[in-house]
Image (spheres, helix red, strand yellow):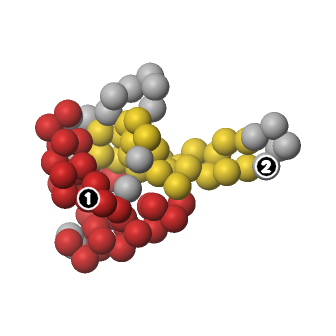
Amino acid sequence: MRTHKNSALTIRLSSEQWLRLEQRLIQDHPRSVTLMLSVMRRELGFTVRRHREFDSDFYARETIVLDFFDARQMTWFILRYGELV
């Protein structure tokens, strides 16, 4: 888990970390929570976006970025799912 240097309310995940987290979210919440951004934001406090970074050899690496809108919800998320990220 990494927080973005410009925002304390952002967590970056690898694709593998996101897959593990997504499976757990599906177990813990109705499927609609992970399918709809507005519901995800309301219920979990964050939205998901995919970001592609390129290294010096032009190799693309996809990262998943969780954007939180409230520090309390981010803290709750870390306490609940921290072992997955």
Q: Secondary structure at mark 2?
A: loop
Q: Which of the two residues, 66 or 20, is positioned nearer the viewer here?
A: 20
Disc 2 from disc 1: Cα separation: 30 Å
Kindly give the residue lying farthest to the front in the view shown: 83
The relative height of residue 80 versus residue 42 in the rendered view (above or below) is below
Rendered-image quadrant of the C terminus: bottom left
Instruction: Give the labeled residue for mark 1.
Output: 81
Kindly give the residue lying farthest to the bottom in the view shown: 27
Say which label, 2 or 1, has the lower sequence index.
2
Q: Are marks 2 and 1 in contact (CB under 8 Å)?
A: no
In this view of the protein, can residue 40 be seen by the observer? no
Q: Secondary structure at mark 1?
A: helix
The percent coordinates of residue 31 (x first, y second) are 28, 73
Instruction: Give the labeled residue for mark 2.
Output: 59
Q: Residue at x 47, y 51 (%)?
A: 13
Count of numbered badges drawn on the protein: 2
The relative height of residue 7 versus residue 22 in the rendered view (above or below) is above
- The amino acid sitting under disc 1 is Tyr
The percent coordinates of residue 40 (x first, y second) are 27, 55
- The amino acid sitting under disc 2 is Tyr
Q: Residue at x 75, y 40 (%)?
A: 55
The percent coordinates of residue 43 (x first, y second) are 18, 54
Residue 11 position by quadrant: top left
Q: Which of the two residues, 48 or 37, is positioned nearer the viewer here?
A: 48
Q: Residue at x 73, y 50 (%)?
A: 60
Please tell me how crowded label 2 is: few (under 14), some (14-19), or many (20+) other residues with Cα within 10 Å. Answer: few
Instruction: Point out which mark residue 73 bears.
Output: none
